[in-house]
Amino acid sequence: MEQLMIPEQDIINAICLYYARKKYALPEDVEVELFYDDEDAQPFSAEATVNGQQQVFMTSDIIAALRLWIEEYMNKDPFATSIDLQFDEEEGIVAAID
């Protein structure tokens, strides 16, 4: 199967959707900032804020958010899909799925 790349903005959208559901808010009310640190054991993380509440998302949380997004917006089985977060100098943080 061909690998599909999910761009950084869609990863942000996935986290907005995921966190909004947990906080009973609208996805557009969530602010997200992604981080990459190649010296960290878990190089990918994010901070999400809604209604003054902030939460840090580690790699596993980002993957969980992407699984929800894949199911709802791509109509694919989120658990039959392999997700690999990557850092690209030009594109930022992207996810390769297949």
Image: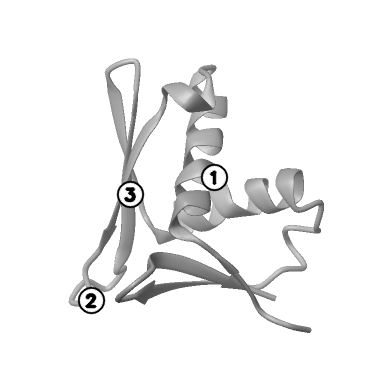
Amino acid residing under circle 2:
Asp
- Across and down, in percent, residue 26 comes to 53, 20
Q: How is the image coloured?
A: one colour
Task: Identify the secondary structure beneath mark 2.
Answer: loop
Residue tagged 3: 46
Q: Earlier in the sequence, mark 1 or mark 3?
A: 1
Describe residue 38's horizontal placement relative to residue 45 as left or right.
left
Mark carried by residue 14: 1
Q: Nearer the viewer, mark 2 or mark 1?
A: 1
In the rendered image, is residue 14 in sight? Answer: yes
Task: Identify the secondary structure beneath mark 3.
Answer: strand
Determine the residue positioned at 54% across, 37% down. Answer: 18
Describe residue 45's horizontal placement relative to residue 15 as left or right.
left
Residue tagged 2: 38
Determine the residue positioned at 77% across, 68% down. Answer: 80
**Residue extending furthest left?**
39
Image quarter of the C terminus: bottom right
Circle 2/circle 1 CB separation < 8 Å: no
- Give the CA separation, mark 3 to mark 2: 14 Å
Amino acid residing under circle 3:
Ala
- Across and down, in percent, residue 20 comes to 51, 27
Amino acid residing under circle 1:
Ala
